[in-house]
Structure formats: structure tokens, C-alpha cells
Amino acid sequence: MKSPLLAYFGHHKAATTWLSNIVRNICAEVNWKACYVSNAKMFDFKLNEFVHQNKVDFLCYTNANFKYVKELDNFRGFHVIRDPRDVLVSGYFSHRYSHPTNRWSELVEHRSKLENLSKEEGLLLEIEFSKRFLEEMYTWDYSLSNVYEIKMENLVNDPYNEIIQACYFLGIVNEPTFKERFSYLTAMFLNRALEKSGKFSFSMSMNKIPEERLLRLIYKNQFPRKSKGRNQGKEDKKSHYRKGVAGDWKNHFNQEHTRVFKNKYNQILIKLGYEEDDNW
């Protein structure tokens, strides 16, 4: 695959597992090297050096800190944000029940506290615990011409359109002619045959994925398939795919949560375009 580096930049509790899976599926389809990082320790605080040394084609950086992203010398990506209030609610349930604790000692301690608190008390604790995740959205540079910006609210309402538009922005999807489609399928099946045989180390890498193949991958990762048959809006609080809807914070915030959140983070809501002032 040719440069520039392709990248998906996400934030904690903003559909990172779902989108990373789609990116991995795309890369497996066209034989690109995908690499997943969630914190700066994983790339030794040197992101640009990391992607070059590891010859990464498509980077998934799921707790994107712009401090490190700005080191990248040649990339094109898409960036997903979410209403910070929904981040907090999703974080509460995930941190309380479903998020893996391996390699995250802070979460082990945080979960033990949540287990001994009511939901109302736990959400107040979550407001403080999620500070760095919200600040990473706040400090992001939203003026980059090489990054396609997406709000998770639009993504969950129309995933096919949003993901396809992002991939067109990256330059990795097309509407192929019959000849191009035939060549693509031939190369894809040959790649898989070579991989299964174990007799050859050679495999072909394609530069673009046909739009219909991308649609298939999005369908493969849709919410009901990932949540064991539940539709969006039907909640399983102990599932990593808990509910899949926007605006759920309204079902969980009380007056005290609203007051504390406004005091700490209202400027984030305004900068990200979720509110115009503190009259909500």
C-alpha cells in the first residue's frame, strides 16, 4: 500500500471497538497492515516513529491525543467524537460491568468503587474519572484539512453513509467497472488461497475496496449482530454494546449531575457543537 498513512482517530466510549473492527475487516480484505493503539505507552510516546518502524498502513488510535497525532508527517484520517454527556453515561456502565481491566490498573480501582455506590453516586464519580477522555476531545485540532470529522450521533443514525463518505475521503473506496470488480475479486480469492495453503509468502495488496464490499463489511458489524440480536435502543447494561443510541444521558442525569457537569465541562459541549450555552 502507498502512503499517506491512513488513520482512524477515536475517543473512549465513542464506538471505538465497532469502528476498529470495521477498519481491521477492511485491511484484511485488501491485505493492508492495521495497527491498534489505545495509549501513548503502546508506541513509547513516539507515534510517528512507531508507524514508520512497524510499516503501518492503517492506524487505529482509540484514545487520540493530539499531542502525539501532530507528530505524524504524512497521514489522512477520520476522527469520531461523541456528546461528552453520553460518554459519561456509557463510561459508567462499561466501567462498572463490561470493560476489560487488563493493562488498566486505574479501572480495577475505579470499578471496585463503583460496585459500592448507587448509580447516582457512580455517575458523579464517573464525571471526575472521565476528565482526560473529555479533555482529549476538547484539545483536538478540528481545522485539519486531512481529517474527516464525524459525530457519533450521525454515525449511529446512518452508519452506511458516514463510513462510506469517510472512506471516500481517505481515497480507499470506489465504484468499480466490471473489469475492475473482476480483478479485485480474483486478487482477493488468490490472496486467501495463498494464505490458507501456507506454501507461499507472496500476496497482493490492493489500493481500493469496491463500495459494495465496504457495505458488506459495515453490515457484518451492525449493532444487532454485535449485540446478539438486540436492536439499537434495547439495553443490556452488562454488554459492551449496551444500547447504541444518542442522547441516553437524559435518562440518567439528575439535577446534581447536570450542575456538576456544567461547572466542569460545559465549554467542551460548546466547542464540540453540542450546546450553544449552559441553558440546557
Image: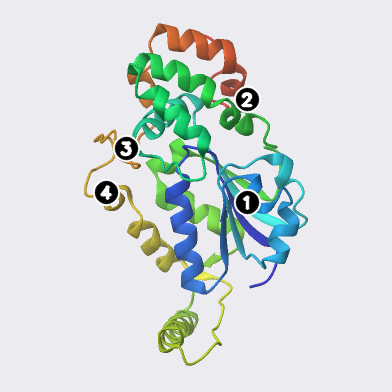
C-alpha gap between disc 1 and disc 2: 29 Å
| Mark 4 crowdedness (10 Å alpha carbons): few <14, some 14-19, many ≥20 | some
- The answer to whether the residue labelled 3 contacts the one labelled 4, judged by CB atoms less than 8 Å apart, is no
State which mark lies toward you, 1 or 2. Answer: 1
Which of the 4 quarters of the picture holds residue 245? top left
Q: Is residue 175 visible?
A: no
Left or right, 180 with reference to 61? left
Residue 151 vs 275, above or below: the answer is: below
Residue at (61% x, 55% y) in the render: 7
Quarter of the picture containing the N terminus is bottom right
Residue 272, image x and y in percent?
59, 28
Label 2 belongs to which residue? 271
Q: Which mark is residue 242?
A: 3
- Helix, strand or loop at mark 3: loop
Q: Is residue 279 above or below residue 69?
A: above
How would you rate the neighbour count of disc 2 (Cα within 10 Å): few for under 14, some for 14-19, many for 20 or more?
some
